[in-house]
Structure formats: C-alpha cells, structure tokens
Image (tube, rainbow, N blue to C red):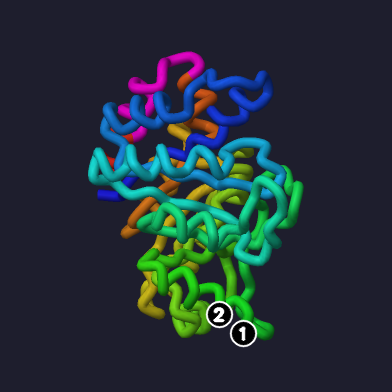
Amino acid sequence: MTRLSVNVNKVAVLRNSRGGREPDVLAAARACLDAGAHGITVHPRPDRRHIVAEDLPGLAALCAEYHVELNIEGNPFAPPRPGYPGLLALCEQVRPAQVTLVPDADGQLTSDHGFAFDGDTTALAEQVAAFAGLGCRVSLFVDPGVRDLERAAALGAHRVEIYTGPYAEAFATGDAATALQACADTARRARAAGLGVNAGHDLSQANLGAFLAAVPEVLEVSIGHALVGEALHAGLAATVRGYLGILARA
C-alpha cells in the first residue's frame, strides 16, 4: 500500500503568524501518527516562515517513538544564514530517514518545479552523495515528463518525487487525462531506471484516488496543504483516516 507522510508545515504557518507555541506542531504530528499516518514531512525554508530548525529534534524524536519515517525537504544549494544552518547541517543534526531535494528559490511561495537532468549535474551529484553519506534515502523532486531519469539514478538518488501540482489543477477543471498520462509515464520510466517513486503537491481526498489508479506502485505520497485545510472542517484524525481509506482502496 502507498504510504502517507503528513506535511505539517501549515500547522507551523499558523503558529508563526501569531508567535508563541500554538498550534503545537508536535501535538499535530502526534495526532496524525495516532490516526495511522506512516510518517511526517517538513520543509524548513531559509526565511523560517513555517517549520524552523528548532522544530526538527522534537519531530525526529517523535518519529523514532512511533517507528515511522521523517522526511525533510529542501533546497540543498540554499546557503546558510542566521536561523538556517543549511539543509545538510539540519540533516546531520537529526538524520531523517529520507531527504527530498527540491530546487526552489529563496522566498518562493511553494515548490512549483523539479530538477532537470539534461545539463551539468556535477553539483547535484555531490549533494546527493553528501546526504546519502548521512544514511538518508535521497529523493529528487521532478516534473512530470522530465527527461533523462537514467541520469537521476546515476547521480545516486534512490527515489524521485513527482510534482503533482499540474495534475491537481487539471483535475479541478475536469480534464486530467493528459496530466495523469504524463505522471504515469514518468513513474514508469523512473522504475525502469531503478528509482522508487513518490508523489506530492496539491493532492487531496478529491483527487488522490484517481491519481493512484492511474499511477500504480507509488511508494509514498506527502500531503499537507489540502489535508490541513480539510481538517479544519472534519478534524485532523478523521481527515488522516480518510486518506488512509483511499490508499487502502487504491
């Protein structure tokens, strides 16, 4: 069954908008795990607008307590600065099971594109090796339809995460066939190259089932924005269980 990693960034956004400790990110993550989630995802950014470095030790300890995986996302090329020591330093501190490398710029609202492998990938290969050297599984964020996935495998990556934002947009308009085909083809080529396949971005209870039906053998989905939004109405535990039901039926 595809595994669900809950991204708790949006809980941290609410907390940071007011200051203080509420809503408590650890409490929210624990509620998700109590409801059956298979892991926790975070994306600490240099501007500290949601998950911050200080959150990571507690989240790592929580995931260890529940015997689930912590997935840390981020741009490996973002330079250190006050309050943000850099992605590699953060992973050295807490040793997540998985790190997902994302080529987003400083201050970018959300991740909206993946890596390409048709140019010089020397620097990326060095980053992949550094994170793998920490014992982390390394996943690379990619666009549906990306070329040269064999080169991604040659870099030493273990998985790719397919960017599902375009699929979610197409699904909302009622015409997702082309976007689904691009995702399915990317997943097929990734597996042929020896890579595992994850997926994430704007997946929701409305569109997840159709995605998994068309793109089989996805190992993990990371879902945060829609899940937290749905939980405002239904509650966090009930929303996590709703996603788990979709995964079980897929």
Horizontal placement of 61 versus 205: left or right?
Answer: left
Query: Eyeballing the image, is 49 above or below 119?
Result: above
Question: In this figure, which residue is indicated by the disc labeled 1?
Answer: 122
Return the x and y of residue 214 as percentages of the image width and height.
Answer: 40, 54
Contact between marks 1 and 2 (CB within 8 A): the answer is: yes
> Regarding mark 2 in the picture, which secondary structure is present there?
helix
Q: Percent position (x, y) of residue 224?
A: 50, 36
Residue 80, x across and y down, in percent: 68, 58
Q: Which residues are magenta?
A: 232-243
22 shown above or below 78: above
Q: Quadrant of residue 89?
A: bottom right
Query: Mark 1, mark 2: which one is toward the viewer?
Result: 2
Whether residue 185 can be seen here = no
| Residue 172 colored in magenta in the image | no
Question: Where is residue 37 shown, x and y percent of the image?
Answer: 31, 37
* Residue sitting nearer the eye, 3 or 177: 3
148 w.r.t. 247: above or below: below
Point out the image quarter for the C terminus: top left
Query: 112 and 108: which one is in front?
Result: 108
Crowd around label 1: few <14 · some 14–19 · many ≥20 (10 Å): few
Helix or strand or loop: what does disc 1 sit on? Answer: helix
- Residue 153 or residue 72, whichever sits in front: 72
The amino acid beneath tag 2 is Glu
- In the visual, does 246 lie left or right of 76? left
Q: Residue at x 73, y 56 (%)?
A: 105
At x 47%, y 69%, the residue is 131
Is 241 a magenta residue? yes
| Amino acid at circle 1 | Thr
**Number of the label disc, if any, that sits on residue 126:** 2
Q: Is residue 106 visible?
A: yes
**Residues under labels 1 and 2: Cα distance?**
6 Å
